[in-house]
Amino acid sequence: MQTAPSNSNVVTGFPPVAKGQLSLGQSLVVSIHDVSTITRPVVERMLADLEGEGVPVTSLLVIPDHHHGGRIDQDPDFVSWMASCVKRGHESVLHGFYHLRPSTSGDGMATRLITRSYTAGEGEFYDLSFEEASRLLRLGKDALKACGIYSAGFIAPAWLLGREAARAVKEEGFEYTTLIGSIIDCREGRKFPSRSLVYSVRAPWRRSVSLLWNEMLFKRLKESPLMRLGLHPPDWEHPAIRSHILTLIRAATVDRRVTTYRDWLDLWRTSVHEGELPR
Ligand SMILES: [Zn+2]
């Protein structure tokens, strides 16, 4: 469903790790999507639970004005809370601006299925023009800056990033973005394949499927250098989902280093020989 940025330099496959270079080892990145003035109370509970399971740092995906429900830079409590998170080592990542895609009457069936059914109409960066995407990215950066926060990364709502929007993300100087199946280094133009675990909780059948799917994916990723776990605030409304997430985290942290996307990217960049990268 996701549209990868059109970068001819994108390289797939695990990067070659040369002898004597830093090894990627095994890492775990837990990200919390949809952090905003609306979701802050539940995100605080999530962070406390995660910390109890050995996850002291996360990548926090911040929405500057969630569904037009309140700007982060006009909420002093949010600003000081976010600053304290960053001080403790959490990473802030820009995550759309409103997290809402204005629906268009001219949308075809495929677009309606992708942006409304699949994501409940939140694919804000799915089909924006380059100019509109750039405008929203700049507004987002300004809102974060007003909170005293810098974001190296941008992650599109529902991981739906169109080609023009992907170009805008690179032009606006973001270091990286992620899709559901990969991490893209915008500076180096490389792609690291890595499927994120994520739960869908909107309906009972989705929750049942999610538990089975993530159980299977977790086993499949056992040997992978990177395990990504994308959480959403509604996950915490369902005890079975919350408990499953915490159980997987307990198992993953036995032999994985907990890090953030930004720090993992730094590690990836230093773990390969520049000269050996296929271009
Ligand atoms: Zn989101």
Image (cartoon, rainbow, N blue to C red):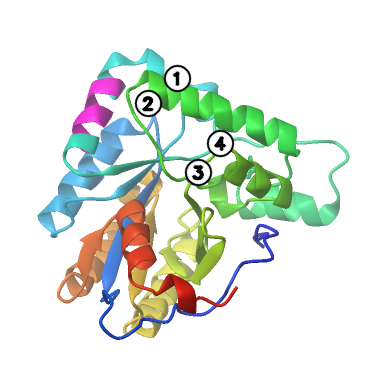
Among the two numbered marks 4 and 1 on one chain, the one whose residue lies closer to the N terminus: 1
Residue at the image point whose x is 58% and y is 73% from the top: 11
Q: Mark 4 points at which residue?
A: 99
Residue type at tag 2: Thr
Among the two numbered marks 4 and 2 on one chain, the one whose residue lies closer to the N terminus: 2
Q: Distance between the residues labelled 4 and 2?
A: 13 Å
Mark 1 lies on a secondary structure that is: loop
Quadrant of the frame with the N terminus: bottom right
Residue 67 falls inside the magenta stretch:
no
Quadrant of the frame with the C terminus: bottom right
Q: Quadrant of residue 227?
A: bottom left
Residue at the image point whose x is 61% and y is 29% from the top: 136
Q: Mark 1 points at which residue?
A: 71
Does the beta carbon of the residue at mark 4 sit less than 8 Å from ligand 1? yes
Percent from the top left, x then y, of residue 101?
66, 37
Residue at the image point whose x is 14% and y is 51% from the top: 51
Q: How far apart are marks 3 and 2 (CA)?
A: 23 Å
> Is mark 1 in CB contact (under 8 Å) with mark 2?
yes
Q: Name the residue under label 3.
A: 174
